Amino acid sequence: MTGTEDLLGSADVDPALAAAVLEIEQHIATGGWDQPARLYALVDTAEMVQREPALAAMMGLDSPSEQGSLTAVEQDQLDPTQLLEQVLEQIEWPAEVAGCAAVVERLVLPPGSDAEVPEDPAAAQEFARDHPDRQEVRIVAGATRHGATYCALRLRAHDEDTSVVGGVDLVPGLLTLLAATLDPADPPESPAAVRDTDRPTT
Amino acid sequence: MNQRLIAAMVAAPLVLGLLLSAAFVPLPYVVYRPGLTVDVLGAQEDGREIVQVDGAESYPHEGQLRMTTVTVTPPKPAKVNLLELMTAWVDGQDAVVPYDNVYRPDETQEENDQEGAAQMSGSQNAAVGVALTELGYDVRAVGVADVEPDGPADGVLRAGDVVTAVGGEPTAQPEQLIEAVGAATPGEPLELSVQRGSGDRELSITPERTDGQTRIGISVAPTFTRFPVDVQVGIPPQISGPSAGLIFSLAIYDTMTPGSLVGDHTVAGTGEIFDDGSVGPIGGIDQKIAGARRDGADLFLVPADNCADAADADPGDMRLVLATTMHEARLAIEEWVEDPDADLPSCEDLESATAGAAA
């Protein structure tokens, strides 16, 4: 497909979330590969302007064109010894956060090789690293409290902006984990998670 | 060096070493890839011509008329995995399409096969009718789509009947039937010539006047009479769907006319054919163009409603020609064989027509 600006599943896309995810993707892409995982809070831009007027003005976020958009706020560097997926299981966001996004680089294998992947996780990783047809993919995945999801994926072997694949459901596992950090209906086990907030239920 | 930094250094190789958990989770997409193309003027596996004509002269021909196909990820349980999807996305020829655009949620392979086979057989019937019409046979007629309960035709006509004449006047098109009925005298019996199954019958219906219109209470659609010539198109059963209709009609026409329609060239194309000879859009135009180019086609016929998608394709030296009807497509091919540089209908004509209308 040549005109790759048209992204997958455009009917269900939340434009604000998609824009935020693609913005993060572009930003990360300028830093190249072999980067650690990152986590972002997505904040309603209008709320941010209200809360931090000076900062927002400096970043140009108070312009009318930013109406309805989400601003990504990078979180402190994650503990590199911990898997992003494990980190996500322990996170719950404060009510001001409208959504979140994560960036992670992973290996993917072609279809058909799943039968050969060892069950033991460590052996599976080794198998993936040694697989001749493995591909490196950078995933930027985001979710909002309203239940929207979006992700943008880039293959290292096709490292061009026009080859970025976007869609609402390309990495279901990761998106579920991200959504769970926002979803009051599915609180993490920690009792601290149960809080009285005005989060909309979905 | 503190502990934390050591941990970071140890962990660094892990950044890239991790297999995406659930990388094999099937995603709700299907991939279109260029499929095989078949020269419909050529021979079947058993050596017989693909187009078999019984009851009329058929003629030898040169050149090739290739129908084009797309290979599509089959329905459940197999959907694509992430890497397959991404590889297809970055590939210039493959397309990634949401699963729901292609299959119903509960559709099985078997249902899909049956539907495809029915569409293939319907497309062949339409192609034969359109080709015979183009050859001058009077095979067009009016099909009864539905009969109004308690209307004048209730109990006389049935859905599926083929009306060939009303009051002795041939009805080749629905408008002719509607006109003939409208001009009839309410209360006076009207004679209809009808083909039903293998029999012919003369039926009498008394029109009535309702809402200022003389009616017999049926809804109609273009169709064909029983064909005076038996034409068979022998396509391998694994190829299904309606999208080869246009190419079938051209191949039948070529087989039943002296000389060669395509000269010694290779013409490929796609498009559903309707009973009135118009060409309808199909899926996977980019992949079909790529397949035709791979198999050496010099000219490719594009249905009008696929022009926007075809604009993305890379036809190379292959000429893309707009096909609105089988008749227009035939004329364009003849003109092109005569003069390869001839000005032929193209998708750009549509764009300039739209631009002109907007101006």
Image (spheres, rainbow, N blue to C red):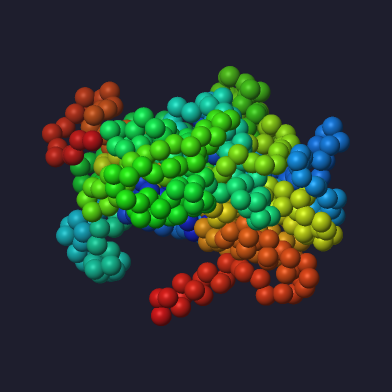
Of residues B238 and B287, the one drawn nearer to the viewer in this rendering: B238
Q: Can you name the residue that lies furthest to the top here?
A: A119
Left or right: residue A49 versus residue B67 is: left
Of residues A165 and A49, the one drawn nearer to the viewer in this rendering: A165
Quarter of the image containing the C terminus of chain B? bottom left
- Residue B259 in percent (x, y) is at 83, 58
The image quarter in which residue A147 lies: top left
- Residue A111 in percent (x, y) is at 62, 32
Left or right: residue B152 versus residue B54 is: left
Residue visible at 56% across and 44% down?
B224
- Residue B43 in percent (x, y) is at 82, 41
- Residue A87 in percent (x, y) is at 39, 34
- Answer whether residue B27 is visible to the viewer in this image: no
Residue visible at 22% across and 50% down?
B211
Callout count: 0
- Answer whether residue B133 is visible to the viewer in this image: yes
Left or right: residue A41 versus residue B177 is: left
Residue visible at 41% across and 57% down?
A23
Residue visible at 74% across and 68% down?
B336
Of residues B286 and B319, the one drawn nearer to the viewer in this rendering: B319
